[in-house]
Amino acid sequence: MHRQRINQTLNPIEQRINRLIPPALENPLPPQAKKGLHEAALRYGASSAQASLFSAEGRITLDAITVTMVCLRSEPVPFWLLIGYLPPPQALHLAVWHHALLRSNEVSMAMNGSSFGIDQAGNAILTKPLLFNSPEDIDELATCLNDFNTLASSLIDLLLSLKAPEVHASPVPTASEQTGEAIQLAQKQMHKTWHNPLMVQLCEELGPAARLSVLHDFLCVIDLPERQITLIGDGDERHLLVATPVHQRFSEEKMHVGLLRANSELMPLSHCAFSLSSAGISLLSRQNSDGQSSAELASWLADFVTLATACDLPPPAAPTNTR
């Protein structure tokens, strides 16, 4: 039921953005949120006209991406999705587009807890779940708009740079090299050790089967009977970037479209997404540990492991003809 309700919300919003016309489909916004949306857009640097449209319809066109705010739930606590729409550059091979989107997810998840997926037409859908229930969230939303624009413009710049260089020009770095540099930059901001004591408590909650290793003082690795989990503490000393590898078959190019489409559903449902690195495909999440006990985090991590383990299950066998 929950999955169906979210799909019913996402599909009209995707259709609305795809048409790029004044909305014919409803995107109801709580009246009490409209002032905050207007102020957040102005704080981002949007014009008064853009801010008014954002507060009225929840839609704003930034330099590199069109963004829509969707309220999935008003009570008991407002639950919002920030959804960005980005069509692929013209004349770009779709395999390159899909590869770049999956590669970007490690950076986007570490940066602000967002991830790239695709819609049925192959357009990128950048999604971030967020709470937006007080005036203090205005700064956060303005930052999210800026992050979305930065992620989209960086992705497009990267893809456009892949064109063949002119004669005598310096070689253009490959997508892997540039994405790797971006990941290294993001990780430099996350070389914190505040979470290490919390990880010890977390493993105590998980039981004796959970074995903790700390690499380079900041990278925590928890080995469970089912799989290995890596956790990195964010520089804000609240969020944890959590990752676990999934089955090797997902690294095949033919699987990339399905993974990206799954991301558009996984983010609203579980705040998880698939990402591609040199090691293969991983399931990622960014979890807020602020105010959570080690028992609550252990319960969340158990759900994360269950989801990753379910992903590893082989696809159902095709029915056989018994005649």
Image: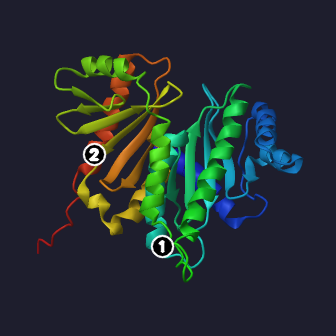
Give the secondary structure at mark 2. helix
Q: Are marks 1 and 2 in contact (CB under 8 Å)?
A: no
User: How many marks do you count on the picture?
Assistant: 2
Q: Amino acid at mark 2?
A: Ala
Q: Going by the image, does 42 lie left or right of 158?
A: right
Query: Where does label 1 land, which residue?
Result: 94
Q: Position of residue 72 (x, y in %)?
A: 60, 40
Of 195 and 161, the residue lying toward us: 161
Residue that appears at 32% across and 36% down: 230
Farthest residue toward the bottom? 167
Q: Amino acid at mark 1?
A: Leu
- Give x and y (percent) for residue 159: 54, 67
On-image quarter of the C terminus: bottom left
Q: Which residue bears the numbered disc 2?
A: 310
Horizontal and vertical percent for residue 111? 53, 41
Quadrant hosting residue 87:
bottom right
Whether residue 175 is situated above or below residue 112 in the rendered picture: below
- Kindly identify the residue that appears in the image at 34 percent across and 28 percent down: 217
Above or below 155: residue 131: above
Residue shown at 82% from the left, 41% from the top: 42
Is residue 25 at least partly visible in the picture? yes
| First reached walking from the N terminus: tag 1 or tag 2 | 1
